[in-house]
Structures are given as C-alpha cells and as structure tokens.
Image (cartoon, rainbow, N blue to C red):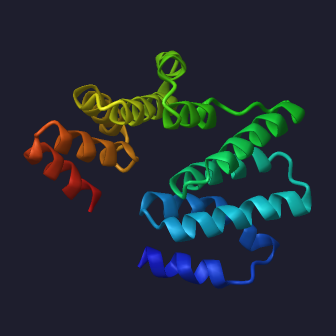
Amino acid sequence: MLRRALTAFRAEVLTDDGFQWLPLACSVSRDIWDDESWYALSTRLIEHARQVGALAMLPAALLMGAPIRLLAGELAMAVSMTEEAEAAGAATANPVGPYGRMVLTAWTGREAATSEMAARGEGQWLTVAHWVTAVLRNGLCQYDEALAAAEQGSSQYPDEPGLAACTRSGTRCGLGRLAGRHRRRLG
C-alpha cells in the first residue's frame, strides 16, 4: 500500500503545500526499501529546495539523497551532495550533523576515520555510528565485528538499515538462524 502511495506521489504535480510532504515521502521510501521512489523523490526535493531558494531545507534534502546515490553506485555524487549539505548548513548557521560524512567514511573503507566518528556518536547518531561500523567491518571481511555493531545499531531502531547488515554479517559468520531472524524482521 505504501509503495502504491509513493508511486502516485512521484507522478503527482505538487503544489507548494504538496512539497512539504516530500521529506516524509523520502523517509518512507527509504524505510520500506523502495529505492526507485527514494531516488526520484529525493531528487525532486533537492530540486525544489534549490528552485525556491530554501537554504534551510537544502542540507536535509541533500543528506536524504546522498545515501541512495551511494547505493546506486554514484560515489562522486554522494560526496558532492554531502559537501554541499555541509556548506549550506555552515552558510545558514545551521550546521548539519555528521551523518553524511560518517556514511561516506565507512563506505570508502576508511577505518580510522570511521572508528573515530563512531566513537563520538549519541542518540540517533549512535545508531548511525553502529551502522557505519557494520558497513566498514563487512567491507573489511570482519564479520563478527560487523554483526556485533549491526545488532547494537538495530536494537534501538529496528527498521533501520542495521538489520540488513545483521543479515549479511550473520550469514557470513555461519549463523544462519540469526541471519534468518533478522531477515524476517526486514519483512
């Protein structure tokens, strides 16, 4: 049902009032793993923020779009979007959190930088810190460490991407039953 709603929302001509729902639509598309909608809606949100000169909205829009660019194999675009989000945040005296930078450091395998950033995490950022640690450890074939980080990250926010890392790590550690449990939680 949510996928149909997102597809309809993507096709709809939005009024000014309709654009206020784009951040929610981006989050929902990410949460239900609808990558096509996430990509399209985040692009639309970024374009809208730029067109209307909404500098306060632009950093969040860019950070919503950067992870899906990574998943689409567009590393240079994700880096550019993260840098632009940080610059726009600084220009508006509303600095962005470390989320975009943390994801990029893990995705590119920079172990020391990822570990340092993850150690400073708190609250929702702590969940992200665990997730990026799991991504990094999976990439370094350190599956036991990846599994531990992914389980920590998914315990507080069970619908977050840490579950996919739990499944991947659990499978590679030979813990098929654990991986299956996390796979069922993903739906």
Figure check: 117 above or below 57: above
Q: At 76% across and 30% down in the image, what residue appears?
A: 95
Q: Is residue 113 above or below residue 173?
A: above
| Residue 112 horizontal side relative to residue 172, left or right | right
Residue 86 screen position, x and y as percent:
76, 35
Residue at 47%, 16% (x, y): give it. 119
Viewer-proximal residue, 154 or 177? 177
Residue at 89% x, 63% y: name it: 51
The correct choice, above or below, for 145 with respect to 160 in the image is above
Compared across the picture, whether 28 is left or right of 175 comes to right
Based on the displayed image, in which of its 4 quarters is residue 15 positioned? bottom right
**Quarter of the image where the C terminus is located:** bottom left
Asked whether residue 72 appears in the rendered view, the answer is: yes
Q: Quadrant of residue 83?
A: top right
Residue 20 seen from this side? no
**Relative to 123, is 76 on the left or the right?**
right
Instruction: Indicate the position of residue 113 as horizontal and vertical percent values.
Output: 55, 19
x%, y% of residue 25?
58, 65
